[in-house]
Image (cartoon, helix red, strand yellow):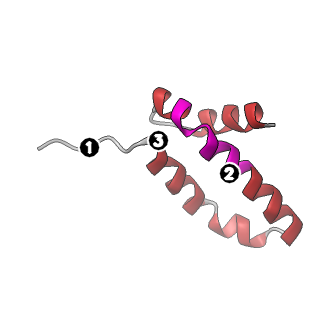
Amino acid sequence: MGCAIPTYRDKISDWEDEYTNYYRALRHDRQLAFDDLVKHVNRHSVAGGARNHYTPELTHLVSICVGQ
């Protein structure tokens, strides 16, 4: 069997995991702001999944911009 390509939601989860230390270093009010940005990424995950690219960071940023 071949390798499965990770879904966009998997990539979002991986991205959040990568930024755990960064998140913990933020002040509480900035953590709340970061949470809002992640919510924008999750809200637009269907559109991001349509793009499902190997480097999803640009899609994350576009989702954040659209959400703002």
Q: Residue at x 63, y 67 (%)?
A: 20
Determine whether the residue tagged by mark 1 lies in a helix, strand or loop: loop
Report the magenta residues as a range: 37-47
Dot 1 amino acid type: Ala
Q: Residue at x 26, y 43 (%)?
A: 4
Decide which of 4, 36 is in the foreground and name it. 36
Quadrant where the image shows the C terminus: top right
Which callout, 2 or 1, points at the residue further toward the start of the chain?
A: 1
- Residue, disc 3: 8
How many neighbours does mark 2 have within 10 angstroms: few (below 14), some (14-19), or many (20 or more)?
some
Quadrant where the image shows the N terminus: top left
Q: Alpha carbon of mark 2 to alpha carbon of mark 1: how far? A: 25 Å
Q: Alpha carbon of mark 1 to alpha carbon of mark 3: how far? A: 12 Å
Up-down: is 42 above or below 23? above
Determine whether the residue tagged by mark 2 lies in a helix, strand or loop: helix
Residue 65: image x %, image y %? 76, 33
- Residue, disc 1: 4
Which callout, 2 or 3, points at the residue further toward the start of the chain?
A: 3
Q: Is 29 situated left or right of 2 in this image?
A: right
